[in-house]
Amino acid sequence: MTDTLIPIRWCDDDSLELLDQRWLPSRREMLRIDTAEAATEAITTMVVRGAPAIGITAAYGVVLAAQRSSGPEWSATIDVAMAQLAASRPTAINLCWALERMKAVVTAHRHAVAPPVEALLETARAIQRQDLADCLAMGELGANLLARQSPRAVMTHCNTGALATGGHGTALGVIRSAWARGLITRVHANETRPWLQGARLTAWELAEDCIPVTLAVDSAASLLMARGEIGWLIVGADRITANGDVANKIGTLALAVQARHFGVKVMVVAPTSTFDLSLARGEDIPIETRAPRELTHQGERAVAPADIDIYNPVFDVTPAGLIDAIVCERGVIETPDHAGISQLLGSGSS
Ligand code: MRU
């Protein structure tokens, strides 16, 4: 184990506690959740965000649903909660992956007179523990790639740290592990418009760990790359298709194009729960769009004219051809393609 920040906690009074990411870094508040509906709402409103963290929260949401289900219809009540949780955010496949694991427990107990609360809780805890273990494994594998060159600065986008996972982080986990091994000199964090995950969360996590971080607007990335200041672009993923295309936070595609132009290597870090081998290519991934207000307002202040059309997709898809390596807990896929992915994951995994 590690002393990583744990933003998702199951409490002794059988409720769920989430570090409310909407207020970081100015306020560090825990939000108590005791219904599946509240868990769904917490995911939708970004109290908790980041692909693996969403999956973990959904798993505990199923436990909360089971606690409140009784009588012969208990499994139907849980099914409704699972459908609501599944619809809470459409792009991150970890959500459906975690719910499938919970569903398997429900199915195995379908003839029981009461919901299998303890078995569901143990499964949710196992998903959370496994994600932390996966992040620690990916951290070392990714750091090994960085060890091939002398220490350089790296760039990251969005937040992929302990806040977004079971702990340590995916891309930020590689950065943490690499920093501990003296393999990087500095982290350039993009602010990540419009929700500012990079400014509010990544810069905060790195500062808490005393890892040198420089924050810049997203559009400064190409200048930094052109000046030769970046060794690797290291990002997470919300869904990876069978051919190695990667959905991640909006702006990742532009960064990958710039990186290729300026000779910066691109590393994607994600556990196997982020792979969706049922989809052949990135165009098949549903892309979430969020409220216009994320663009039109800063807090209460309007920063755009009222009543104009707004386009706010929050993910984009980077083609496999722009990616140098995908790191997952089972190993590293260099120059990812269909063959490399099925070799590492096996055609049945998702
Ligand atoms: O909209 P968010 O904040 O949930 O988006 C998160 C990302 O895009 C992350 O890069 C991705 O989930 C990987 S997190 C380990």
Image (cartoon, rainbow, N blue to C red):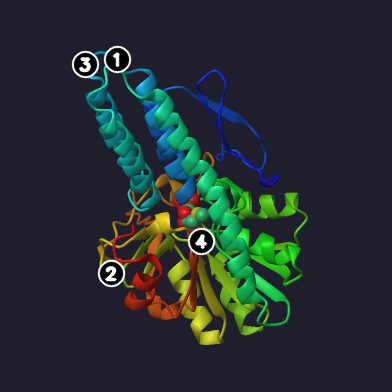
Measure how far apart labels 2 and 4 are at the Cα level.
Answer: 22 Å
Inspect the image, locate mark 2, and give the three-letter code of the amino acid beneath it.
Arg
Q: Which percent across, then down, holds residue 46?
A: 47, 41
Task: Indicate the secondary structure of the residue bearing disc 4.
Answer: loop
Q: Nearer the viewer, residue 133 or 198?
A: 133
Inspect the image, locate mark 4, and give the three-letter code of the amino acid beneath it.
Glu
For disc 4, the marked residue is 329
Measure how far apart labels 3 and 4 are at the Cα level.
Answer: 41 Å
Q: Nearer the viewer, residue 31 or 58?
A: 58
Report if residue 261 is visible in the image: yes
Residue 64 vertical placement versus 51 (above, below): above
For disc 3, the marked residue is 72
Task: Indicate the secondary structure of the residue bearing disc 3.
Answer: loop
Task: Indicate the secondary structure of the residue bearing disc 1.
Answer: loop
Task: Indicate the secondary structure of the residue bearing disc 2.
Answer: loop
Measure how far apart labels 3 and 1 are at the Cα level.
Answer: 7 Å
Label 3: few (<14), some or many (≥20) within 10 Å?
few
Q: Nearer the viewer, residue 64 or 109?
A: 109
For disc 2, the marked residue is 281
Task: Quadrant for the C terminus, please.
Answer: bottom left
Which is nearer the N-term, disc 3 or disc 4?
3
Residue lying farthest top?
Answer: 71
**Residue that appears at 70% across and 55% down:** 206
For disc 1, the marked residue is 70
Measure how far apart labels 1 and 2 are at the Cα level.
Answer: 42 Å
Which is nearer the N-term, disc 2 or disc 4?
2
Q: Which percent across, then down, holds residue 200?
A: 62, 49
Inspect the image, locate mark 3, and give the three-letter code of the amino acid beneath it.
Pro
